[in-house]
């Protein structure tokens, strides 16, 4: 079985030492830098804007994976691509015309992803699933770091993988929220292929070793 793809969430980095943190990730085995953008409307918090993402892009040698926790993503898709986004994921719950948004992401040359919150059933994605590169399953409620993992997520991943096997067999299933070496193996066995980890990585005594441990789970 392929190794898990690891996507450290920059939101958990020390922004006072951001260049050093990005350099550390560049030298690690991580696969993507995960960029959480929050608008204070769809989710309670505000994270950072495009001047910061463009600064990260200048320092990063890893591809960038944008997770847009914003109410109306369409006006910002071009800015994401200009900031280095290779993947852009938008929330099923926040997009008025999800098919149109997914098509726009692809037209800009990025890989489209769709995110579902803990309360959203995977079956809601049936009609969009053939069009997307990945589905991000939130295993906490979005908007805050350091939350506890919701155990129901394992069942959701199982159901999503079964659905994808018939509609989009190459689908990447990403999980975000409360991810650590303690649950990475179980997530992989459920069908996950990509893990987002923030606090677990950046608070580890050796983040590079921790990333490698996650990949090998």
Image: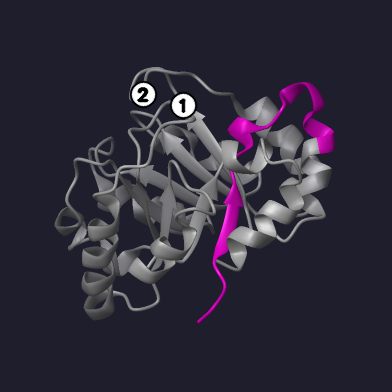
110 with respect to 213 (left or right)? left
**Res. 139 image quadrant:** top left
Q: Is residue 188 covered in magenta? A: no
Residue 1: % across, % down: 50, 82
Q: How is the image coloured?
A: one colour
38 with respect to 27 (left or right)? left
Q: Which mark is residue 142?
A: none
Residue 47: % across, % down: 54, 23
Residue lying at 82% horizontally and 55% vertically, measured from the top left: 27
- Graded by Cα atoms within 10 Å as few (under 14), some (14 to 19) or many (20 or more), the crowding at tag 1 reads many
SS at mark 1 in the image: strand
Q: Bounds of the magenta span? A: 1-20
Residue lying at 21% horizontally and 65% vertically, measured from the top left: 159
Q: Label 1, on which residue? A: 38
Of mark 2 and mark 1, the one earlier in the sequence is 1
Tell me, yes or no, whether the two marked residues, 2 and 1, touch with CB atoms within 8 Å: yes
Residue 39: % across, % down: 44, 22
Q: Label 2, on which residue? A: 43
């Amino acid at each position: 079985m392929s190794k898990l793809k690891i996507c450290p969430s920059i939101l958990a980095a020390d922004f006072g030492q951001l260049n050093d943190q990005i350099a550390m990730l560049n030298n690690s085995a991580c696969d993507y830098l995960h960029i959480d953008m929050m608008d204070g409307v769809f989710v309670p918090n505000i994270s950072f804007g495009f001047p910061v993402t463009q600064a990260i892009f200048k320092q990063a040698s890893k591809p960038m994976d944008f997770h847009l926790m914003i109410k109306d993503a369409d006006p910002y898709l071009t800015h994401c691509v200009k900031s280095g986004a290779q993947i852009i994921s938008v929330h099923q719950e926040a997009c008025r015309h999800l098919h149109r948004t997914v098509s726009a992401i692809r037209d800009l040359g990025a890989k489209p992803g769709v995110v579902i919150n803990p309360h959203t059933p995977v079956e809601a994605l049936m009609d969009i699933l053939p069009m997307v590169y990945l589905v991000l399953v939130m295993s906490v409620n979005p908007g805050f770091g350091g939350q506890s993992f919701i155990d129901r997520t394992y069942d959701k991943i199982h159901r999503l993988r079964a659905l994808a096997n018939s509609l989009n067999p190459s689908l990447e299933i990403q999980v975000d929220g409360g991810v650590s070496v303690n649950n990475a193996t179980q997530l992989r066995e459920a069908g996950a292929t990509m893990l987002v980890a923030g606090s677990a990585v950046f608070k580890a005594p050796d983040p590079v070793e921790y990333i490698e441990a996650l990949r090998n789970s």
